[in-house]
Amino acid sequence: MAPTASLFEYVASKLDEPPLTPEELEFMAEHEKVTIVPNFTLNLPNSMLTCIEGTYGPFRPNIPVEVPMYLALALNRRNKCRIQPPAWMAREKLKAVLDEERTIPQYFQPVPQYYVETAKMLFAEARAIFGTNAEVNEIMDLVEELKKVRNSKILDGLRKVSGPITVKLNNLSASESNKIRLLFENSLNMWHQLAKNNKEWQEIQMTGTMDTPATL
Amino acid sequence: MTDYWNLDAALAEETTVPLRFKFGVAGVARVLEPGSTANDISAGTKVEAPLWLSAALSRRGMASMSAPEMYSERYRRKINAGAECMNLKGRAPYFYDVGNKCNEFMQDLTLSAFLSRTYATRYRELVSKGLSTVSGEDMLELQSKLSLEELSVFEAGRSSVARAEMWSRGARLRTAAAAAPSRKRASARGDAEGREPRQRVEG
């Protein structure tokens, strides 16, 4: 019979280097596409910009074009474009999702995978795209509310876990799943180890022998 | 084989368990039984030995071990009544680990079910306090009662939420390396600009 593993093997202390940091998630979120309206003409063939990971364009004044977020933010910083707010960030849409989220406690509403990161980046660098100050604050509050409601739903769901079972967590955004990643994974591992111990004992009872191997 | 280099696992095995020798042992009486007068341990004596020793001897059939006091009937009743209030850090910091290892050698079917049940109750508190962003006395109070295994799970949750909070507020992790280069660059730039016009005038 193999010696039982220590629980500390599973509950690995990856505290100083977590597998995924929020900054890395922000980096990945910068790949999401947004629509911008440039105010310049790109002096390249076809006005297309060739980056390592794709070609974007054509960049002509007042003609909307879809680019990844990092490009949109870079152009915005140089005042070369106007970013259009993503469709899911319209006030009515946010209100509808928030209401759905509140009324149905079992499921999560489908949200963009990087909604937290996108919202943060847009509010930090391009507040004006949402309209007046009052409107910007309103949308910021709506997004905050959404985060809070989903967060409490996640905690409620986690509390109900009471063994090494499979849990259904649909439609979780990237930042939310990163928050619970370490804790959830490690506690499931602890459950698993405790349950494994139980099973080993039951098997020994059934076979009826308890051999003592000579080696440690 | 368990992770040989894991420091916490090694420390967990230092916990003492009651051990009953089947045969006599020569020369170690002073070590295992600090108050004894003889040099040898006679067969049938009960001592408190560390888990690593007890497990090895039990496997070779030279001694029989039993669970530490923490898993006895009296304590089990106490824990079953109020699992989340028990101060595991003070009494048995390696509660789950030692319990798991003892399970191998003892004729006790209910031990691991008992461990699972305890963990289930305490886990609920762990989650609520660990993943909330408000720190405070509640959290500290809970932290002082957790066993070391639970503590690492709790820390994992708390640190990931703390990182996310810091990031969303726009703060950066402060490290010495991050602060120094910016200052050096600014001073170097200043020096270079100061030096260049002078050189041009001289040349």
Image (tube, rainbow, N blue to C red):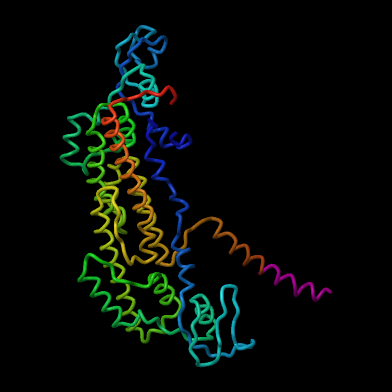
> Measuring 30% from the left and 78% from the top, which residue is drawn there?
A94
Does residue A45 sit above or below B23 in this rendering?
below
Residue A3 screen position, x and y as percent: 39, 31
Q: Which portion, as a residue range, is magenta?
A: B190-203
Query: Horizontal placement of A53 versus A182: left or right?
Result: right
Residue A195 screen position, x and y as percent: 29, 41
Residue at the outermost front position = A207
> Measuring 26% from the left and 79% from the top, which residue is drawn there?
A96
Q: Quadrant of the C terminus of chain A?
A: top left
Residue A67 screen position, x and y as percent: 50, 80
Query: Horizontal placement of B50 versus A163: left or right?
Result: right
* Of residues B146 and B96, the one drawn nearer to the viewer in this rendering: B96
Taking the magenta stretch, the answer to whether it contains residue A199 is no
Residue at the outermost top position = B38
Query: Horizontal placement of B113 versus A19: left or right?
Result: left
Does residue B23 sit above or below A216 in this rendering?
above
Residue at the outermost bottom position = A62
Does residue B40 sit above or below B196 in this rendering?
above
Residue at the outermost right position = B203
> Measuring 50% from the left and 93% from the top, which residue is drawn there?
A62
Q: Quadrant of residue B59?
A: top left
> Measuring 38% from the left and 51% from the top, which residue is drawn there?
B156
Question: Magenta span: helix, strand or loop, mainly?
Answer: helix
Q: Quadrant of the N terminus of chain A?
A: top left
Residue B148 screen position, x and y as percent: 34, 40
Query: Horizontal placement of A18 versus A107: left or right?
Result: right
